[in-house]
């Protein structure tokens, strides 16, 4: 599992991350993860490019703590669809695909409400009789892409932020 030792909390305002200045202006507006179905409107109200990097950043951060299960169970799971797009725009399509594959467990439309995601996870785990193994292969693929694709997340994010000005 990746370990972001320079910034264990994943704080976008931490200067250890070269892209922090780029996403900091949207962070306050987007960190209210508890809005469920209204979150896409909040997301659409801020500049798109830093918002997409913010989404990819928070997906990466939540994944470093608890894999896909932790990401989907947590409040930041609300931005999974935006994280998919975020990974794509920063040049990490395989990481985006891993997130998209994990989202398929929930069906369409993707549930923005945290309680709904948790309920669905519990049902899926009852059916499969597997809590820990449910996302194991997808977690592994995501971590490999996060570390190796496009020079790794930090490098891809920094390039994207620099090119976006």
Image: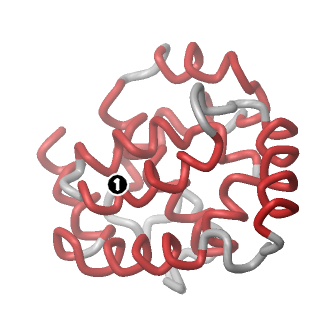
Which residue is depicted at the point 42% across and 34% down?
A: 51
Does 56 sit left or right of 95 as displayed? right
User: Which residue has dot 1 on it?
Assistant: 97
What residue do we see at 59% from left, 78% from top?
A: 136
Frontmost residue, 110 versus 76: 110
Q: Residue visible at 68% across and 79% down? A: 133
Task: Tell me if residue 74 comes above or below residue 139 in the rendering.
Answer: above
- 119 relative position to 92: left or right: right
Q: Dividing the image into 4 quarters, which one contains the C terminus?
A: top left
Where residue 134 sits, quadrant-wise, is bottom right
Residue 40 lies, with reference to residue 105, above or below; the image says above
Q: Quadrant of residue 66?
A: bottom right
Residue appearing at x 42%, y 70% in the figure: 142
Residue 95 at x, y = what percent?
Answer: 34, 61
Q: Is residue 60 above or below residue 56?
A: below
Residue 61 lies, in percent from the top left, at 57, 64
Where is 124 relative to 52, above or below? below
Q: Helix or strand or loop: what does disc 1 sit on?
A: helix
Q: Nearer the viewer, residue 139 or 151?
A: 139
Q: Where is residue 148 shown, x and y percent of the image?
A: 25, 80
Q: Mark 1: few, some, or many residues within 10 Å (few <14, many ≥20)?
A: some
For this view, does 26 lie left or right of residue 91?
Answer: right
The quarter holding residue 157 reads bottom left
**From this viewpoint, which residue is outermost toward the front?**
127
């Amino acid at each position: 599992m990746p370990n972001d030792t320079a910034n264990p909390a994943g704080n976008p305002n931490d200067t250890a991350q070269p892209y922090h200045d780029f996403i900091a202006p949207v962070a306050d507006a987007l960190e209210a993860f508890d809005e469920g179905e209204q979150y896409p409107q909040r997301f659409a109200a801020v500049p798109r490019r830093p918002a997409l990097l913010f989404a990819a950043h928070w997906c990466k951060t939540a994944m470093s703590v608890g894999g896909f299960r932790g990401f989907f169970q947590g409040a930041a799971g609300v931005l999974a669809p935006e994280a998919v797009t975020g990974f794509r725009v920063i040049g990490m399509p395989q990481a985006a695909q891993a997130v998209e594959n994990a989202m398929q467990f929930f069906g369409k439309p993707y549930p923005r409400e945290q309680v709904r995601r948790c309920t669905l996870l519990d049902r899926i785990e009852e059916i499969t009789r597997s809590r820990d193994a449910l996302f194991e292969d997808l977690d592994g693929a995501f971590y490999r892409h996060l570390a190796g694709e496009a020079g790794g997340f930090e490098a891809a994010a920094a390039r994207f932020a620099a090119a976006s000005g």
